[in-house]
Structures are given as structure tokens and as C-alpha cells.
Amino acid sequence: MTTSFRGPNDPADPAATSSVSTVSSDVDPAVRAELGRLRDSIDNIDAAVVHMLAERFKCTMQVGHLKAEHHLPPADPARESRQIERLRALAESAKLDPAFAEKLLNFIIAEVIRHHEQIADQPTADTD
């Protein structure tokens, strides 16, 4: 996946807004510049997260189709439990709150299951 991320002040980006527009003009210019730099980084990370989630959902949609073709259930509680434990460990090693990571993954898993249920409910090509 090759993705080019634009800064928030990129005129080619339709959602571009100034990352320091809410900072008062009486704030030291060096502080404003540092805020802008950090906010640009945050904006790029947010874009990367969205693109990574899109890629993840492309994969989970393929899983959903495979499950539906083979009459497998949309949810796999054992796999989900392993994923939550794995993500909690990754969060701890990354100095991220494991409870937050678990909430995020549970939210994503719920959406994946919803997609899998929708796929399973679709009529198959061999059904008359």
C-alpha cells in the first residue's frame, strides 16, 4: 500500500485547515510553530490510522465472504479473545492503556461481525 499523506495546510487537501488557527496571536511564535508541527504529525497519523483501518476491513470482508461460503458463523469468540489478549500485550509494550486498546478492538470486532452477518444474509449465486 502506497499512500501519500498530506499536511493539514496542503491546498490540494479539500479538508485542509490551519493546524494553529485556534492559537491566540499573543502566543510566542516558536510555540505556535511547535504546535503546528505536532498537529501536522497528529493529522498524518490520523490519516494513516484511517487508511490502515480501511485495509483491515478489506481483509475482514474477504473473511466474511469465505465464512459465508462455508457456512461458518460470523463471530469467532475464541479468535476474538486471542486478539484482545494480543492487542493488550502490544498496548502495554507500546505504553498505551491496554483497557483503551481493548475497547478499540471490541468496537472494531463488533463492526466486523456486523459486516459478516450482512454478508451471510445475502443470497448466494447458487440459490434459486
Image: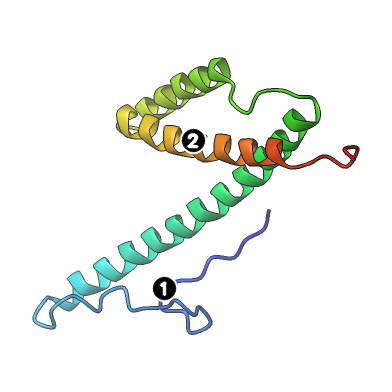
- Residue drawn where x is 13% and y is 79% of the image: 24
Question: In terms of secondary structure, where does tag 2 sit?
Answer: helix
Q: Position of residue 85 (x, y in %)?
A: 45, 19
Figure check: 49 above or below 66: below
- The residue closer to the viewer here, 95 or 57, is 57
State the image coordinates of residue 7 (x, y, percent, origin top left).
45, 71
Q: Which of 83 and 37 is in front in this view?
A: 83
Q: Residues within 10 Å of mark 1 (few under 14, many from 20)?
A: many
Residue 34 in percent (x, y) is at 26, 67
Pointer 2 residue: 110
- Which amino acid type is shown beneath numbered disc 1? Pro
Write down the quadrant of residue 68 in the picture.
top right
Could you tell whether 124 is left or right of 117 in the image?
right
CB under 8 Å between discs 1 and 2: no
**Residue 21 in the image, given as x and y percentages of width and height:** 25, 79
59 is higher (above) or lower (below) than 86: below
* Residue mark closest to the camera, 1 vs 2: 2
The residue carrying mark 1 is 8
Q: Residue 111 carries which label?
A: none
Label 1, label 2: how many angstroms apart (C-alpha)? 31 Å
Q: Going 52% across and 17% down the picture, which residue do you hit?
A: 82
Q: What residue type is labelled 2?
A: Ala
Question: Which quadrant does the C terminus fall into?
Answer: top right
In the visual, does 86 lie left or right of 26?
Answer: right
